[in-house]
Image: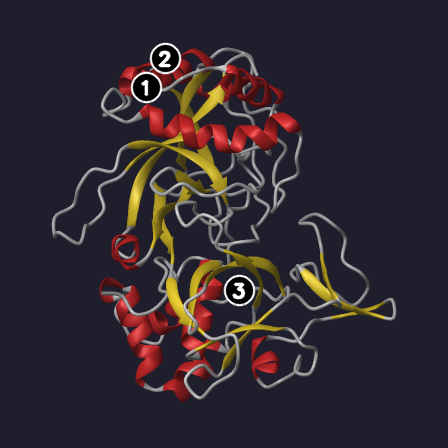
Amino acid sequence: MLPRGIRTGVWWRLNRPEALVVAGLGLLAMSGATPADPLSALPPLAEQANLRPLAFAELPGWERDDAGAAFRAFLETCKPLAGGAPAQRPGVKPPEGLVAICRKALAQQITESRAARTFFEAHFQPFEIRPKSGDGFLTAYFEPEIGASRERTAEFPVPVLARPADLVTFAQDEPRPPGIDQTYSAASMSGGVPSIYADRAAIWAGALAGQGLEIAWLRDETELFITQVQGSARLTFTDGTRARLTYAGRNGHPYTSIGRLLVEQGEILLSEMSLERLTGWLLADPARGRVLMERNRSYIFFALEPMLDPARGPIGGAGVPLTAGRSLAVDRTLWPYGLPVWIEVSPLTPEGPRRPLDRLMIAQDTGSAILGPARGDFFMGSGAEAGQRAGLVRDSMRFVVFWPRGA
């Protein structure tokens, strides 16, 4: 069983809410497809990837996949898209064709997989996206379930902090104020004067103490750190009540992968790096673990929300609940939320052998390490079993976007 609150890909993946702008082209002329460029609404991709139109028959497992499950996840994102509601973590604007398809989907009474498959085939054209640097790459994540206290105790001494009042977050392409480098995604604004926000080490040393920001207390800093990498968690308090931690902002510092640092320092071989190994390393010597974690200056703030429906997943970047096995985090500066994405990958499983994981996903989340045209992060669900499965996914994959026909 994985230690408390571990997320796969932690040595590559950055904190969920931020992403890096990636530039490139319009590729259809290179692929021999129709003159109309279906990606004209997106940032150009030519410098990073090759695009090839496909027939649905070229997708292994397409006829076997549960298109109905994908359609239900698709509807979750269609509701805010059709209504023009803003995303929780704004990304590239969805094409009008996708919005129009969403309105059609919401008006349908589709309850079984065959009808859902027919709907996707009628309204989307598959395009394989292959990075010039190599294959697509998939990791996975999950929502940890951890114990917590509403008050500080000897067992629960580490605070979870709410968003401070002076924290100002910048849009990805928004010019930064004087004195704030473009690499910072947020700053402190006091008396109209911006300044770089306190980093992880300063916050852990008490820089924000006395502001009443504590919303829960966890067992140790490693647990908090991994929860911050996850971006959400289910808490079970000592009084038996439950609640959910949801992302509320970050201090704006660039993220540093501590797992990558351990690999570079020769502490853990890349081939042996796992969630259990990483967490075990941090917990084996808490003082040394804290020094390493403080090298990641990025710090995440949370909101505490009631657990209204345990069957629902955490809220993703699109602003809708994530669906286990169907929600995919993508680069939000390249792909719009709600876009169907077909993936083909064969990760390891807790049972031992690799197994095909070929299925239709829906772009509903994002992350700072989820960068590039064929990068994805697979939401496995909540709890320890989901964590075990997520921790084994770190694989090359085939990445196929379903682009709206006629968009």
- In the image as oriented, which residue stretches furthest toward the left? 352
Q: On the image, which quarter does residue 289 sit in?
A: bottom left
Which quarter of the figure is the C terminus placed in?
top right
| Residue drawn at x 49%, y 33% as measured from the top left | 76
Q: Distance between the residues labelled 2 and 1?
A: 10 Å
Q: Nearer the viewer, mark 3 or mark 2?
A: 2
Question: Callout 2: helix, strand or loop?
Answer: helix
Residue beneath label 3, please? 255
- In the image as oriented, which residue stretches furthest toward the right? 191
| Residue drawn at x 66%, y 82% as measured from the top left | 207
Q: Which of marks 3 and 1 is in front?
A: 1
- In this orientation, does residue 28 appear? yes
Q: Residues within 10 Å of mark 1 (few under 14, many from 20)?
A: few
Q: Please, is residue 37 above or below residue 191 in the view? A: above
Question: Callout 3: helix, strand or loop?
Answer: loop
Count of numbered marks: 3
Residue beneath label 2, please? 118
Q: Which of 210 and 284 is in front in this view?
A: 210
| Residue drawn at x 34%, y 24% as measured from the top left | 68
Q: x, y percentage for residue 20? A: 57, 50
Q: Which of 77 and 275 is in front in this view?
A: 77
Q: Residues within 10 Å of mark 2 (few under 14, many from 20)?
A: few
| Residue drawn at x 40%, y 21% as measured from the top left | 126
Q: Which of marks 2 and 1 is in front?
A: 1
Q: What residue type is labelled 2?
A: Thr
Q: On the image, which quarter does residue 178 sit in?
A: bottom right
Q: Earlier in the sequence, mark 3 or mark 1?
A: 1
